[in-house]
Amino acid sequence: PTPTLEPVISKERLNLLVGNNLSTPGNLKANETIHYTFTAEQGQRLNASLQEEGLLMTILGSTGQAIDDRATRVRTWEGVFPAQGEYTIELSLVRGVPESKYNLDLLLTNPVPVPTPTITPTPTPTLTPT
């Protein structure tokens, strides 16, 4: 029988800067999971993608739960952070894949302010008696 390898979880802190693309290369084996942690503000948007097959990511909130229903075991994720805090991108291999190189591409952006319409009062016409 082949010995089962103990799971290995690596943690790495990312310094995500607003507006800067961050590309993080790496190599993952079947028994490994990597957690990339970073801080985000409420309303900030993240675009995250993995180009490689056989590798999936989950975006976790500070509670350790997936941030939304589209954030579990995906190759791409785009979404808005609901609150300021610590977030984690968890990378793991698809079952049956022994090893994979990867490149995790990330872009953090601030929310686009929505202009508030200004209401200009329309003058009410005054009736002049004839």
Image: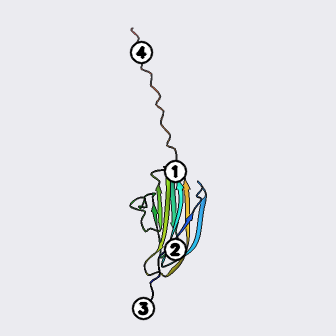
Q: Which is more toward the observer, 12 or 44?
A: 12
Q: Say which residue appears at 52% left-offset and 47% top-offset.
A: 112
Q: Amino acid at mark 1?
A: Glu
Mark 1 residue element: loop
In this view, the residue farthest toward the top is 130
Mark 4 residue element: loop
Residue count near mark 3 (Cα–Cα under 10 Å), binned few <14, some 14–19, many ≥20? few
Q: Which is more toward the observer, 115 or 11?
A: 11
Residue 1 has which mark? Answer: 3
* Label whose residue precedes the other's in the sequence (3 or 2): 3
Q: Say which residue appears at 45% left-offset and 21% top-offset.
A: 123
Left or right: 105, with 130 as reference point: right
Residue 41 has which mark? Answer: 1
* Label whose residue precedes the other's in the sequence (1 or 4): 1
- Which residue, given by chain and number where applicable, does mark 4 sit on? 126
Q: Are marks 4 and 2 in contact (CB under 8 Å)?
A: no
* Label whose residue precedes the other's in the sequence (4 or 3): 3
The image position of residue 81, as x and y in percent, is 47, 53
Q: Amino acid at mark 3?
A: Pro
The image position of residue 8, as x and y in percent, is 50, 75
Mark 3 residue element: loop
Using the numbered discs, state the Cα–Cα distance from disc 3 to disc 1 in whole angstroms.
49 Å
* Label whose residue precedes the other's in the sequence (3 or 1): 3
